[in-house]
Image (cartoon, rainbow, N blue to C red):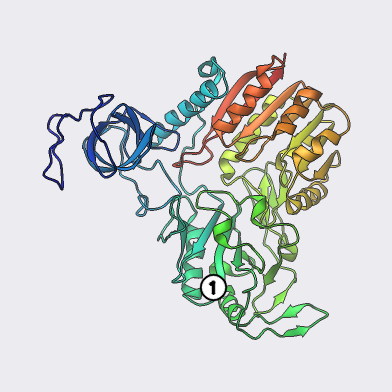
Amino acid sequence: MAGFKKRGRNRSLGNYKVNNVVHDKVKRYDELPIEILRLASDGSGVGYIEGKATFVPGMLPGEQGVVRLTQVKKNFQRAEIVYINKFSPARQPAPCSVYPQCGGCNLQHMTYETTLAWKKQWVIDSLQRIGGLKYAAEIVQDVIGMQNPWRYRNKAVLHRDSKGKFGYYKEKSYDVVVFDDCLLLSEITNKRIKTLQRVLGDSCPEVRSVIFRENRAGEGLVVLNCEPGKYGSGETREKADPEDGKIEIGQLGKKLQQLKKEREFSTPECILMVSKNARPSGDVMSSGDVMSPEGVMPGDLELDDISGDGVVNTGLIEQNGCKLDDGCKLNDREFNNGRFYECMGDLKFNVSPYAFLQVNPAQTLKLYGLVLDWADLKGREEVWDLYCGIGTITLMLAQKAGKVIGIEENPHAVQDAIENAKENKVENVSFVQGKVEDRISALPGSPDLVVTDPPRAGMEKEVLESLLAVKPAKIIYVSCNPATLARDVRILTGNGTYQAEKIQPVDMFPWSRHVECVVLMTRL
């Protein structure tokens, strides 16, 4: 590192050295040499300056260079790259043109194999450090990756800037990053984004964000979220006929009428809806996130199906048949009254616009396959499915169990789950709407197996206490957050009631810092 020189100042670096050497008065905007030793779980490179952990986004282990301090705290500091003079062999050019600005991906600057290796290490680190599992390295398997880790997402939420442009949020910011082609989305979804941008232009400012969904057949669901109280603001909105519910929606209606003439948005290729009372986009989500149930509160959601004549109605939308690889068939007239379906295995699921669905269909089948394999059901068991969403895992479990009960807070998802059970003629299931922590203690019976797939915050204290009280023979925990997973595993295994037997990470979100895990815990 002796060859390093200061760029942009005349002051020399003096006695500054790499890693754990104390020196005087390190402060913000100083430019200092560093060597990266590891990756933090947010994808940042970690080295040490003045003995203090320094986080540098974009640098990889083994790389050396000069960084500029952007934040100096008592126990850590953050920095940005000035230049790198020794590169890691794992480094690759990021194929995305807006990768440095966009908050959707964190790991495109390294090879895919490297991302999988570090995700496994992050899981092990969390389970050892937070979960107290000293043997974690022995039971955490290699991450199940993708053969082609691109264009895998079935959902995107785009936000709109003051000029009417759509894009993702920049990380830790509400600044909108506009892109030409998101490599995580299919080509048809990218086309829909471009077409929507072209048709709307800078008009209809009440549209603040847009949800794009796509099923495995390539059919789309697009929901335009309007700012509360501003849906059609300043425009004539006359009720044409109180009996059939048709309402003129002014300029936005005209734009939607134009949009429906575009191939990507035409019936039956795509369902187009408007949410009149969705919360402002800044309160809901950022790029890379899956919209949570809190994005729209019960009673606040009003969705209008937009037909080609520029008026609101709830008419039937027809859908041509489409055979999917996994055996499920989307038949004619599937999109009845604006319903959007997805298939998994031999089951078909109705998905409400604001209901949760895993964003990576190919990896979801692998994930759920693991759950079913580890459950090893014989046909007589009682199963509880916590945080069950629209009933995907629930119905799959019900095909092999005696009885399954699902609990879900989101009322839209619960309604989907009930309809999905009827649609698939699965009768040995029931669903409870409400917070899991409020409902679990009142459930009748005693489960043989509990499957839980909580949000990133993990399970609440009351849920963990209930599980320890009912003591099912097995708990299968599906998690998208290794830190909260480790916390909960520590509680469940800490008193000798359960033992973690198997831990399988699955790469549900290639090129991001996120990793999904399935954990099998058995009662001792």
How far across and down, in percent of the image, does residue 79 sit?
32, 41
Residue at horizontal 80 percent and vertical 35 percent from the top: 440
Residue placed under numbered mark 1 in the picture: 262
How far across and down, in percent of the image, does residue 2 sit?
13, 29
Quarter of image, res 380: top right
Q: Judging from the image, what secondary structure is the residue with disc 1 in?
A: loop
Name the quarter where the N terminus is drawn: top left
Residue at horizontal 62 percent and vertical 78 percent from the top: 232
Instruction: In this rendered view, identify the residue nearer to me: 355 or 42.
Output: 42
How far across and down, in percent of the image, does residue 404 sit?
81, 35
Q: As drawn, is 172 to the left or to the right of 20?
A: right
Three-letter amino acid code of the residue under disc 1 = Glu
Residue 110 visible in the current orientation? no
Instruction: In this rendered view, identify the residue nearer to me: 26 or 155.
Output: 26
Quarter of image, res 254: bottom right
Is 326 situated above or below 50?
A: below
Residue at horizontal 59 percent and vertical 32 percent from the top: 484
